[in-house]
Amino acid sequence: MGEMESFYTNKRVLVTGHTGFKGSWLCEMLLQMGAHVTGYSLEPPTNPSLFEICNLQEKMDSIIGDIRDIERLKSAFEQAEPDLVIHMAAQPLVIESYRTPVYTFETNIMGTVNVLECIRNFSSVKSFLNVTTDKVYLNMERKEGYSEDEMLCGYDPYANSKSCSELVTKSYKNAFLNEKNIAVSTARSGNVIGGGDFSDNRLIPDCAKDTASDRSIKIRNPNSIRPYQHVLDTLYAYLLIVQKQYENPELAGSYNIGPDEDGCKTSAELATLFCSAWGDNAKWENISVANPHEDNVLKLNCTKIYNTLGWLPKWDIGDAVCKTAKWYKAYYQKDDARKVMLDQIKEFLQ
């Protein structure tokens, strides 16, 4: 058993947003390491959902509740008595934030306030991570990656609400949590890919759905550049931050999490990689249409986490796309997609 697995064995971990795509991968990963996992979230946000495919509700303490409901959230903390808290519950979609800005701000800002208020009042918590996004920065459409000390001012309601979530976290950290010796960090990660994401208006899920139905993939912003990496690389970084700041609170702070330059791809390049990994004459087409504003270029400078915690992505973009395509192909061909997931977790941790 590795150092990380030993650390998480028998730890009590509360994960908000556990029924989502990243939350499901994270909970499965923690369960494989022997942690006691409690989740707090709304019902799975998609149908189908990775959470239900993996039958996670039978293997962990799953509490269904709204992150805006502080009384229900307090009862979840009472039940879990967590050592560690990882906060991922959010309205996570840019396009949806244009449709429902009030809900997005309520969920992403006041949801964070509610989690921090619970942590302030429950003495069991020793390490907390707020997962935000690479979109928290004031985007100048430049080619260089943004570093952790740059201005926070996301453009759209999703990005801006996450910028505010960062500020809320810093305020609670300074005003309340430092004196309680609770280690607090935020994680700003780039786009993640992996099997089991069924969200609308996301590139890889759309690629998988279209190719499985023998349709050409529709790409609406072929030239937009994003940092992409496999979900396991991102989640491993989250777990590493939580562990290392628990062991040494001086390591707490804000961390960018992203791939090297090779992992920064246009939507067209990523779709081409996916088609190659899938095979079967998969193809894509450009259907550029007028859409709400989205940043065209977004890159991260991840020197801090590389130098401070020794984290580097394990799987390059080619590996990440191949493993993602393998999961979706198993799912749509009615093979054992959960086994593919467990095999990938096992391979990654080795």
Image (cartoon, rainbow, N blue to C red):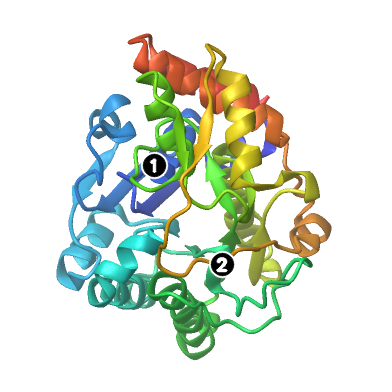
Could you tell me residue 130's position as x and y percent? Answer: 48, 65
Residue type at mark 1 is Phe
Give the residue drawn at x 61%, y 42%.
268
Label disc, if present, on residue 295 of the rendered structure: 2
Could you tell me residue 301's position as x and y percent? Answer: 76, 64
Badge 2 marks a residue whose secondary structure is loop
Left or right side of 151 for 262: right
Residue type at mark 2 is Asp
Left or right side of 77 for 327: right
Could you tell me residue 147's position as x and y percent? Answer: 73, 72
Residue found farthest to the right: 307
Q: Nearer the viewer, residue 333 or 78?
A: 333
Q: How many numbered marks appear?
A: 2
Specify the quadrant of the image occupied by residue 27. top left
Is 102 situated above or below 38? below
Sequence-first disc among 1 and 2 = 1
Label disc, if present, on residue 21 of the rendered structure: 1
Give the residue drawn at x 33%, y 10%.
334
User: Can the viewer see residue 349?
Assistant: no
What distance separates the C-alpha of mark 1 from that of mark 2? Answer: 23 Å
Q: Nearer the viewer, residue 101 or 120?
A: 101
User: Can the viewer see residue 78?
Assistant: yes
Specify the quadrant of the image occupied by residue 1. top right
Could you tell me residue 295's position as x and y percent? Answer: 56, 67
Left or right side of 215 for 279: right
Is 124 situated above or below 270? below
Quadrant containing the C terminus in the rendered view: top right
Left or right side of 295 for 291: left
Callout 2 environment at 10 Å: few (<14), some (14 to 19), or many (20+)?
some
Badge 1 marks a residue whose secondary structure is helix
Give the residue drawn at x 52%, y 72%.
182
Callout 1 environment at 10 Å: few (<14), some (14 to 19), or many (20+)?
many
